[in-house]
Amino acid sequence: KHADATINDIVLTMCAGTLRAYLHTRDALPDNPLIAMVPVSLRAPNTGAGGNRVGVLMCNLATHLSNPAHRLETVRNCMNEGKAALQAMSPAQVLAMSALGAAPLGVEMFLGRRGPLRPPFNVVISNVAGPRTPLYWNGAR
């Protein structure tokens, strides 16, 4: 509340700090900030249980900043701007924009991870609970 941030902003900033520390200790911290693909709910607060309206945002994690308060400010501003932009779109536009951001991953997977396109993000961060049973892909848990 003091930082005028959501719990999601705090989670993203904590992840950013952890990634920064991890990469810094390995002398692998990039000069440019890492970008996270973040799923967000766009459903209005009082709409009941009538389905989901979900989109994805690209969030600047500000891993290039050493000050955690400045990282939080950057994350908060980035998420607020992204949510405002998505709120102004129709559900079809949100779906199209979200798919556009993830499209390079599909191309890379199709071409065997050697595709010419790079996704606009470095990491996916979500605090949405996953399935309760283990999932497997190509034999990997």
Image (cartoon, helix red, strand yellow):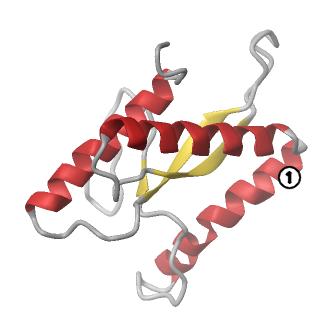
Q: Is residue 3 above or below residue 85?
A: above
Residue 94 in sight here: yes
Q: Nearer the viewer, residue 107 or 17?
A: 17
Name the residue located 16 percent from the left edge and 54 percent from the top edge: 22
Left or right of 112 in this view: 21: left
* Residue tagged 1: 93
Question: Where does the image place residue 28, in percent across and percent down from the top left?
Answer: 19, 70
Q: Is residue 86 above or below residue 52?
A: below
Left or right of 112 in this view: 48: right
Mark 1: amino acid: Gln
Name the residue located 76 percent from the left edge and 25 percent from the top edge: 43
- Mark 1 secondary-structure assignment: helix
- Residue, far left: 25
Q: How crowded is mark 1: few (under 14 residues within 10 Å), some or many (20 or more)?
A: few
Question: Where does the image place residue 20, in percent across and percent down from the top left?
Answer: 25, 53
Left or right of 38 in this view: 98: right
Residue 141 in sight here: no
Name the residue located 23 percent from the left edge and 44 percent from the top edge: 18
Question: Where does the image place residue 131, in percent across and percent down from the top left?
Answer: 42, 31
Q: Which of 77 and 39 is in front in this view?
A: 77
Q: Is residue 93 above or below residue 126?
A: below
